[in-house]
Amino acid sequence: MSPHVDILDQPERLASSFFGSLAFHGLLVAAVAGAGWVQSRNTISMGDPNGGRFGAVTVNPVASIALPSHAGPKNPVATDTESAVPVPVSKAKPAPKVTAPDPKAIPIPSRNAKVSRPSPAAAPPDKWRASQKDLPNQLYSTAGTRVATPDYALAGGGGVGVGTNSPFGNQFGAYADLLRNRVAQYWQTTTIDPRLRTAPQVSVRFTLHRNGSATGIRITQTSGINALDISAQRAIMDAAPFPQLPPQFPKNEAEIEFVFELKR
């Protein structure tokens, strides 16, 4: 039986491992160097490899780059040119150019033009005066009532207004003002005693139809003065027929009430 040999007591041979490691690292270094050489041959070098020795360089972006001009001499054949032939001088003055006026222009009147003024409006006819019989002990006048404008109503008249039960409301307020101004224009107060300065109100109601006619004219509130009540009722009769009802008015007739107040 062979004697027992302790494996730990025997020396290990490292020569093969050492030379193998040297060969591996040599091949690794050669591979890295070869890769760098190949990469350096395929790289395009732009600018100074040392950076121009100016350090950091600022680059400013621009919106556009001006292109070089390609303008050259113009072709006289292809370009319009003025004629070099001398033109004889004409003694006659050229006719001025007349431009047609704009059809939408508003003509300006001349300073010497005569301005036509509208004739003054004539006084409204008095229907009751034509049918009235003249009395020998009473004076009459053919002239109309003075200061008979919507601002003053009529001479001696305090005012005419639509009653609180007006069917027009805010939607047809302009039409209600038109009726009030027309009745105020026909209210005659010359037959009332001039010594009477104020009087109670008179209310007159009537039916206004679509075509502007008035029917059923009656006194709903008397002032106690017969002449004043009759003058208010006659104002409605003389002012009729009225302008037609507005097309948007929902009914074909309306109950209208006017209030007359005398103030002098």
Image (cartoon, rainbow, N blue to C red):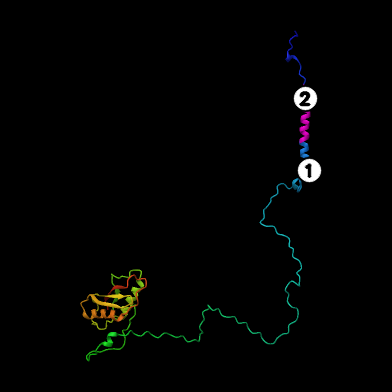
Q: Main secondary structure of the magenta part?
A: helix
Which numbered tag is attached to residue 41?
1
CA distance for labels 2 and 1: 35 Å
Above or below residue 57? Residue 228 is below
Residue marked by disc 2:
18
Above or below residue 103? Residue 19 is above
> Callout 1: helix, strand or loop?
helix
Provide the residue span drawn in magenta: 14-31
User: Does the image show residue 152?
Assistant: no
Question: In the image, what residue type sits under mark 1?
Answer: Arg
Quarter holding the C terminus is bottom left
Question: In the image, what residue type sits under mark 2?
Answer: Phe
Q: Is residue 22 magenta?
A: yes
User: Does the image show residue 33?
Assistant: yes
- Dot 2 or dot 1, earlier in sequence: 2
Above or below residue 114? Residue 46 is above
Q: Is residue 132 magenta?
A: no
Q: Which is more toward the observer, 252 or 197?
A: 252
Tell me the residue at 74%/46% (across/down): 51
